[in-house]
Image: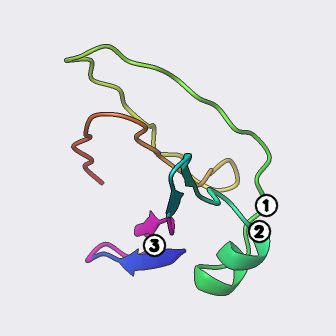
Amino acid sequence: MNFIPTEIPEVVIVEPRLFRDERGYFFESFSKQTFDAGIRSVQFIQDNESASRYGVLRGLHFQKPPHAQSKLVRVVRGRVVDYA
């Protein structure tokens, strides 16, 4: 897994390593050990998934401590324009 820092502190692009063969591909989307070593100690409490149609705008809400949550965004097909 590659962790690519951005100009914004604590905003990191997580790029999984794809393992391809004639059947398709496989990748590890999360490993606590890898995230702890590459970013910081994380403890996922909740995992949500949503599907959007073309042209849909979704927002992730900013939260202040003690209710702050880290966000992990994954694009399965298509593309995303992400603003932080």
Q: Which residues are magenta?
A: 7-18
Tell me residue 13's x, y (percent): 40, 66
Residue drawn at x 44%, y 66% as measured from the top left: 15
Label annotation for residue 67? none
Circle 1 crowding by C-alpha within 10 Å: few under 14, some 14–19, many from 20 = few
Which mark is nearer the camera, 2 or 3? Answer: 2
Q: Which residue is mark 3?
A: 10
Answer whether labels 1 and 2 touch (C-beta < 8 Å): yes
> Label 3 amino acid?
Glu
Which mark is nearer the camera, 1 or 2? Answer: 2
Instruction: Name which of mark 2 and mark 3 comes first in the sequence.
Output: 3
**On screen, 7 above or below 50?**
below
Q: Is residue 73 left or right of residue 46?
A: left
> Label 1 amino acid?
Gln
Q: Secondary structure at mark 1?
A: loop
Instruction: Name which of mark 1 and mark 2 comes first in the sequence.
Output: 2
Which quadrant of the view contains residue 1?
bottom right
Q: Is residue 15 left or right of residue 49?
A: left
Circle 3 crowding by C-alpha within 10 Å: few under 14, some 14–19, many from 20 = few
Q: Which residue is mark 2?
A: 32
Q: Which residue is mark 1?
A: 43
**On screen, 6 above or below 81?**
below
Q: Secondary structure at mark 3?
A: loop
Q: Secondary structure at mark 2?
A: helix
Task: Give the dominant element type of the magenta stretch: helix, strand or loop.
Answer: loop
Given residues 82 and 30, the one toward you in this image is: 30
> Label 2 amino acid?
Lys
Tell me residue 17's x, y (percent): 51, 69
Residue drawn at x 76%, y 53% as measured from the top left: 44
